[in-house]
Amino acid sequence: MALLEYALVGGILYGVFFSLVGIGLNLVFGVMRMINLAHGQFIMLGGFGAYLLSSHLGLNPVFGIPLAVAGGIVIGWPLYYAVVPRLQRSNDPEMLSFILFFGIAQVIEAVTLLVFGADQHSLPDSALGSGNIGVLGQDFPDSWWVAVAVSVLCIGGLYLYLSSTRLGFATRAIMADRDEARTTGIDVDRVAAIAFVIGLSLAGIAGVFVPYMVGSVSPSIGGGLTTTSFAIIIIGSLGNPLGTVVGGLVFGIGTMLMQTYYASWSNLVPYALLLVIVLIRPSGLLGKAVRSA
Amino acid sequence: MRNATGGTRYAVAVLATLAVAFVALPQVYGNQSVLFTMMTYMALAQGLNLVYGFTGYLPFGYVGFFGTGAYACSILVTFTGLPVLLCVIGGGLAALLIGLILGPLLRLSGAYFSIANLAASQIIYYVVSNEALKPLTGGPYGIKIDQVFAPTASYAAMLVVLLLTTALAAYFRLSRFGLGLRAMHQNPISAAVAGVNIVRARLVVWLVSATVAGLIGGVYAWNLSVFYPDAVFTLEISVFAIVFALFGGVGTVIGPLLGAGLLYTFYAAIGVSTPQYFQLLYGSLIVFLVLFLPNGLVSLLVRRKLHVL
Amino acid sequence: MRKFLKHAWTACAAGAVASGLALSGGAAQAANAPSVLTIGTLYASSGPFAVASKGQFEGLQYWADTVNKDGGTYVKAFKKKIPVKIIAYDDQSSTATATTLYNQLITQDQVNILIADFGSVLTSVGIPLAAEHKMLLIDPTGSGANFFTKKTDYLADVSIPSSTVWPLTLGHFLLGQKIQRIAIIYDSNDFDASQAETLKATLEKGGVKPVYYHGVPTSESNYTVLLHTIAAQNPDAVIEFGYAPNDIAFLRNLSSSGLHFKMTFTIFPGQLLDLMTKNVGAKALAYTYTYPTPPLVQTQKVTYGPNTAAFVEQFKAAKNAEPNFLDVAGYNTGLVVQDMLETAPAFTQLSFHQALMDMSGKTTTLLGDFKINENGAQLGELFSVGQLVPSGNGNKMVVVYPKEKATGTAVYPAPAQ
């Protein structure tokens, strides 16, 4: 019984964090209709940012959060204007952007590898508190709680942004119909560029906590994070950022339960869930996807 | 419309060039593994082109069929002792079966399809590599069929599969069936009105493409003869096939061959001398191509009004 | 189309010419002494095996540098010293790339001696290729049990025991300590699973049945839940068999979970202590048991090459860094090749293999006794059991079993932190 409770509580914590991991990818897809295949590599960059701050400047890794936001702006803004408008004019933006971002992912991974080497790097446990906090008699490390708190803040912040700011309204209008949004006078590129920056920043922030939740950060973890993020956002529903939380929770609890009872099958969880949900309810838990013909 | 005999002649010329080239190359260049892998990627890019180029469905998880073929072939070799060529065909049939099971995915639209297909390939991978299946697949400990190891024979077999795949692409490109496919890709609703059975045509293409990948996987396993699950299920295989096909130009016959041939040569050349910069160069090249040459190399030929098959 | 072929052709031809130029040693069977001995090998600069692979490669290179400083290595077949040259390619931890590169070494570079990359996975694809081309594959650290199932002249595991024999001493230690409740968690791969199986068999022979015995995927990076599942069985000893990233995640999760076991064992603190300390922290590593490997344990008396202490001195002076186990393994591979060339009467692959078989049982290097069987498996160089004990800011290795090698006694149960 204690095991079940542990798996459930752990799954919720893990799932909330993984919502943060996936949410940036989903926001970018929702607004730009483009698959950011470099998503996991941006997360990885966030992890390395925190590592640099902590190992070279002796700062607490949480300062990786503002660094991730700064990185999101510095990389995201020029990148958006350099590639996206051009791709939107092409005949198959969705697929071409997929390949473009694959190229970007390769570049990021290669550069990180040249700079940091292939080793795994981790962050000091004590930085986020070395104790444990219990819920229902189940103890989890402090660092998990910090990661979850930050995830909740970020996701809540994104929700407020989308639901109650002018830019957020414009963003949602673009998600619903890009062309119509343009005709109503919205500066689509500016709003979408901001969304892209937010998406990358959220990825970077998630990256700060990856060394705690996953164990360590190394240049090669990006690809796996991208695939897991895909699974999570498609369980939730592609293009709907808040559905990601549902996806994250399903993923987190599913993974923890499998780890507890059928450990060797646990890495099947995100993919099996994804396939089942897509086939039973092609729209994801919230949304639409069947093509018209 | 182009006249059919001219097209057929062009197709025969492409097939003959391929055959002659890959028969002759080992005489001047002894690293057969490089040539074999080049053919593998040419065939995979072409097989993926069948479904992506002619229906617009991008199978992210194409590697799933490849891996299925590799494992089905190896399991047949291990447990039945059938001639290895029959085992390779068994690999193709196993992939066909998986294609049938995944048929319902074709109901989904663009990105959903790609990602669901990716998930499917990962599921096959995790099942094949699970420890519980050790007696059958060898699980994570890999599988060994070195009793049939035959580099030259498997090289020849891969050439045959490459020619077969290319012939299929030429058929799709030139036949009425292919015309219907393209009409449906460009405008599914009016194609349906015009009497093209969209659902069936799409399924046929999907199954053909899956079978081809299974055959390629079977021959690849035969050539490698000792491998671990990740060697035939790594997503890199899907991604390379997609990038190679797009680099050359999808929806054509020579595009994927060109793309795979050139990029793989580049890969092999850099991979041997300065691998640490390979990933960087390769990634930058892809970004550049997408931005400045989105329809692939063949679009350069088309721009010069050259006839492209 | 034609244009493309021309392209591919030129590129391939250029590649062939380039590698032809690199070929300075000549064919392996050449009757005349080559001016340089070519040794072909692979390493991984990226991917999951990079850390270990680079260590091994560095050790091998260090060996080549040392012999070249003396004018080369003595080759009995030609009765003279010949300098060695290492031709190495980067397989980036990919078996597909490794396949083409092994082939490159054999067919294009026609190296005299072929040495595998680190570990079972990257070694596996080289085995049939080497056999096909009748080359002896010198296998430093590919210890997967299924490689050594039949007699062969073309495979020799030289720097690491076959993984099935690794946990024999560990098993005897556990039985000797009368520890009854033992949990074993392992990654599903050759290296770890064959150890888990051996350990389980050893324990069961001694009448102890593990209370927990489970495989997890090699990609496992989060042990938090698993640790709680294990703790639910109330084990006294928890044995985790993984690769370095798994061990790091396992130990970190253990220390942050607040759980405590009387004994915890993992493999890599004994091989990559610096990496583990950096990632897990000295405090969390304290009292962990492991297989101590050279240079953490020393072989004093050797029949060939420097002993462990002498090697550490030389290496530190030359490289300005402490060697780890993989540096030693790579260096030892070079030493074994050197001894082999000094004793093989003919310059052929079969003669090389015979020389290794003749050395078996009579040779001791800095890694310990060299004992190889006809299937190519290494049965010597056995590991002992060690425990990391706090000392200053870090930990020091205390060998606790077997008795004849012990430098201290085990702190059991481990004190709670």
Image (tube, coloured by chain):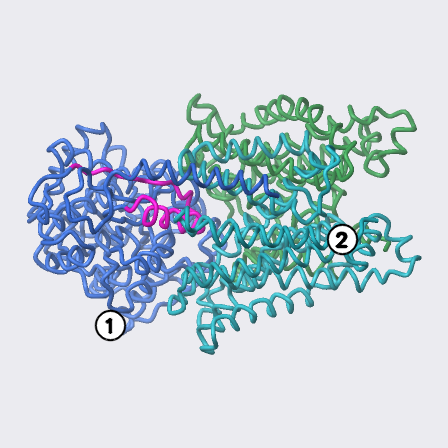
Chain colours: A green, B cyan, C blue
Visible in this render: residue A208? Answer: no
Local SS, label 1 = loop
Visible in this render: residue B98? Answer: yes
Q: Which residue is located at x 52 percent, y 50 percent?
A: B21
Indicate the quadrant where residue A189 lies. top right
Find the magenta span and give its range: C83-110
Q: Position of residue A18 (x, y in %)?
A: 61, 44
Mark 2 vs mark 1, CA separation in Å:
64 Å
Residue C90 belongs to the span the image colors magenta: yes
Chain ID for label 1? C
What residue sits right under mark 2 in the picture?
B55
Q: Which mark is residue C206?
A: 1
Q: Which residue is located at x 65 percent, y 55 percent?
A: B12
Local SS, label 2 = helix
Q: Amino acid at mark 2?
A: Thr
Q: Amino acid at mark 1?
A: Gly
Q: As displayed, is residue B301 above or below residue B18?
A: above
